[in-house]
Amino acid sequence: MKRSEINRIMRENLEFIEKMGFRLPPFAFYAPETWRTLGHEYDEIRTHMLGWDITDYGHGDFSNIGLFLFTLRNGSLSDPSCIKTYAEKILISDEDQYSPMHFHFHKMEDIINRGGGNLIVEVYNSDENEGLAATDVTVTTDGVVRTVPAGTKLCLTPGESITLPPRQYHAFWAERGTGKVLIGEVSMVNDDNTDNRFYETQGRFPKIEEDEAPLYLLCNEYPQAR
Ligand SMILES: [Fe+2]
């Protein structure tokens, strides 16, 4: 992705986040040059990869296959001294902007429509070969359990949420004609390097073509403290 596209997505989605009455923490707005001056007291942000995260899943077509994310808090699966067992993100999905079918080996997560348009969530069980099972899927939405056929596309209106257990496949996007959705994610610790099983192989952290200066650094770009 071009840096100019990343900057544009940051600006547009920041405006949407503020319009929805949500506020990001102070570290969201530190200038890139400021990060070089910050010491080890900021290491949790660096090592737990908090902050801005924009992906086109390697397809180079962000408006059709992509997701805006901002990680607000997270623990660490690789650091046994970390006692934080939970994570929170906000995500933004635009109309028909697809986040591809995947499950998590470890992480259980609630995906919440925090406002805007309607969120479509497509669900499948995984089979023993990590494929899509044809079996009915038991889903929990806002504390209510029900069983739906494989591949059901659930529609979450603002305020509604779904609980996704480990190994339950899910894909999601904002419903066409309803506007982009501010999505909350409340979950166990998130590790995008080891815990995601995409049904079809996807990229995760895009290679950036530097055609202008970054507005804010992405979560995998922080310089180490000296
Ligand atoms: Fe997920």
Image: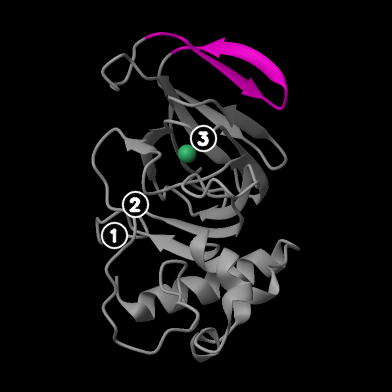
Measured in 3D between alpha carbons, the distance from the residue under mark 1 to the one under mark 3, in whole angstroms, is 27 Å
Residue type at tag 1: Asp
- Quick check: marks 2 and 1 in contact, CB under 8 Å? yes
Q: In this picture, which residue range is highlighted in magenta?
A: 135-149
For discs 1 and 3, the disc positioned in front in the rendered view: 3
Instruction: Say which quarter of the image contains residue 155.
Output: top right
Q: Would you place residue 77 above or below residue 33 in this image?
A: above
Q: Would you place residue 129 above or below residue 33 in this image?
A: above
Is 131 contained in the magenta span? no
Q: Residue at x 55, y 32 (%)?
A: 108
Residue type at tag 2: Ile
Measured in 3D between alpha carbons, the distance from the residue under mark 2 to the one under mark 1, in whole angstroms, is 6 Å
Residue type at tag 3: Lys
Instruction: Say which quarter of the image contains residue 170.
Output: top left
The residue that disc 3 covers is: 107
- Quick check: marks 1 and 3 in contact, CB under 8 Å? no
The residue that disc 1 covers is: 61
Instruction: Say which quarter of the image contains residue 200.
Output: top left
Mark 3 Cβ inside 8 Å of ligand 1? yes
The residue that disc 2 covers is: 65
In the shown orientation, is residue 9 left or right of residue 5? right
Q: Magenta-highlighted stretch: main secondary structure?
A: strand
Task: Bin the neighbour count of mark 1 within 10 Å (Cα to Cα): few under 14, some 14-19, many 20 and up.
Answer: few
At numbered mark 3, what does the secondary structure look like: helix, strand or loop?
Answer: loop
